[in-house]
Amino acid sequence: MSSATQNGNAATVPAAHHQAAEDDTDLRESLAGLSQLTLGSTGLAEMLTHVADFAARAIPGADGAGLTLVHDEAPNTVVASAEFVREVDAIQYRLGEGPCVTAALEGRTIRSGSLSGEKAWPRFGPRVGRLGVHSVLSLPLTSAAGIVGALNVYAHAKHAFDERASQLGELFAIPAGISVHTAQQLDKARRVAGQLQSALSSRAVIDQAVGIVMSRSGCAAVEAFDKLRVISQTEHRKLADVAQQVVEEAVRRARARHTGQ
């Protein structure tokens, strides 16, 4: 081996160590950011977007990342760190084939460095290749409840993701899956609480309207409720909206009598 070749190899080793150290730092910082994510005052989509952003930073070679969640056994991209990611995923959902679909439904890591020639997805690969997207790393997101979706990482370059990128991606996907599932459950709890509050408010205003109708017509509660229900059905309006109008009109009349107008 010539001295020039030896010197070249020697120079490559420190560079590789330096790159590995940078990759490890990016992963640690992304995991730290992931651990601090909460719904807080933000919505589910915004929080999941942060997860996608952290993923794009944590995985070497990534140009963009997206999160696919499974609803009724059908995958659907919820958020993406770059618009081209959403476009790529839309293609595979439309075709029903692609790495994201496989990772989400089968629960295994999918990696390809030449999508345009990928035999596993003969319709999807050429289409995204024409968009200039050639590499993908799709990782299943799992929790105690099972597979909740997939993390999809894309790059424009060919063979952008090596074995190390796959390993780092799998390390990131473990806590990411837990975070996504937790965020989903918290968001669901919020929505249920909001619906319950709305139902309680509606019940209160309906009870008030029933009382007003009873006082005006001298009928029983059941008959008063039936009167409101008939109006609701006839006018194709929600019962709560009809009740709200009855209450508001009663308030206006009371104020008018009080002011003498």
Image: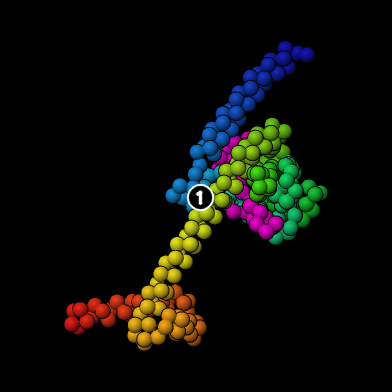
Task: Identify the residue at horizontal 73%, vertical 17% (top origin).
Answer: 5
Residue at the outermost top position: 3
Instruction: Judge whether residue 39 can be spotted in this image.
Output: yes
141 over 168 or under it: above or below: below
Which span is picked out in magenta?
A: 52-78
The residue beneath circle 1 is: 46
Question: Coloured how?
Answer: rainbow
Task: Identify the residue at horizontal 20%, vertical 83% (top origin).
Answer: 261
24 over 222 or under it: above or below: above
Q: Residues within 10 Å of mark 1 (few under 14, many from 20)?
A: few
Instruction: Judge whether residue 82 can be spotted in this image.
Output: no
In the rendered picture of this protein, how many numbered marks are placed on residues? 1
Q: Is residue 206 magenta?
A: no
Task: Identify the residue at horizontal 69%, vertical 33% (top origin).
Answer: 167
* Residue 203 position by quadrant: bottom left
Q: Amino acid at mark 1?
A: Glu
Q: Quadrant of the N terminus?
A: top right
Spot occupied by residue 219 in the image (x, y as percentages of width and height): 40, 86
Spot occupied by residue 191 in the image (x, y as percentages of width and height): 51, 58
- Is 51 left, or right, of 110 in this rendering? left
Task: Identify the secondary structure beneath mark 1.
Answer: helix
Q: Is residue 67 magenta?
A: yes
Residue at the outermost right position: 119
- Is 243 left, or right, of 62 in this rendering? left
Of residues 202 and 186, the one drawn nearer to the viewer in this rendering: 202
Spot occupied by residue 196 in the image (x, y as percentages of width and height): 48, 62
Task: Identify the residue at horizontal 56%, vertical 35% (top origin).
Answer: 31
Spot occupied by residue 42 in the image (x, y as percentages of width and height): 46, 50
Of residues 30 and 236, the one drawn nearer to the viewer in this rendering: 236
